[in-house]
Amino acid sequence: MTYSIQRIYQYTGQKPAIFIDRLWPRGIRKEVMTDISWMKDIAPSTELRKWFHADKTQRYAEFCQRYQLELSTPEQLKHLNDIRQLQQENGTLILLTAAKEPEHSHVPVLIQALNQL
């Protein structure tokens, strides 16, 4: 399966793309991003996100484990299957995030879960 990670601030309109953060990013108008899907429910829970942001460096490993648990619920498995289906229909799927360091965020955990389906 092929997934590409891109910051939403650098998005230039390639399709297909989905935004996978829970909160809409500052400075990005929703009206400009009408060609992407926003799957905020696949992002880490608000509680987990806040906990992680309090100390990203020290908590990353545990954050990954806790997010993996969140992704194992039936509701999240449905969202994962929806993303996988979109990728299968279109080839490479762009996963958009506002994270400053996407490689040190929820995105790698999400891709790992998608690849295990």
Image (cartoon, rainbow, N blue to C red):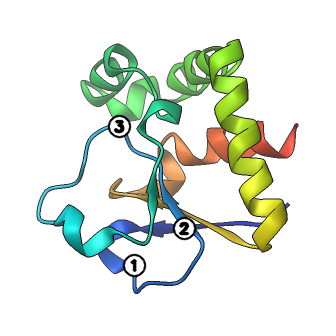
The residue identified by callout 3 is 22
Q: Reading the chain from its start, which is encountered first: label 3 or label 1?
A: 1
- Residue 83 appears left or right of 85: left
Instruction: Give coordinates of residue 58: x percent, y percent.
Output: 41, 26
- Distance, label 3 to label 1, CA atoms, is 18 Å
Instruction: Give coordinates of residue 85: x percent, y percent.
Output: 79, 52
Q: Reading the chain from its start, which is encountered first: label 1 or label 2?
A: 1
Picture quarter with the N terminus: bottom right
In contact (CB < 8 Å): disc 1 and disc 2: yes
The local secondary structure at tag 3 comes to loop
What is the three-letter code of the residue carrying label 3?
Answer: Arg
What is the three-letter code of the residue carrying label 1?
Answer: Tyr
Pick the front one: 97 or 78 = 78
What is the three-letter code of the residue carrying label 2?
Answer: Ala
The local secondary structure at tag 2 comes to strand
Residue 82, image quadrant:
top right
Q: Dot 1, crowdedness within 10 Å: few (<14), some or many (≥20)?
A: some
The local secondary structure at tag 1 comes to loop
Measuring 32% from the left and 58% from the top, which residue is drawn there? 100
The residue identified by callout 1 is 11
- Residue 61 appears left or right of 8: right
Instruction: Give coordinates of residue 19: x percent, y percent.
Output: 44, 55
- Distance, label 1 to label 2, CA atoms, is 9 Å
The residue identified by callout 2 is 17
Q: In the image as oriented, which residue stretches furthest toward the left?
A: 27
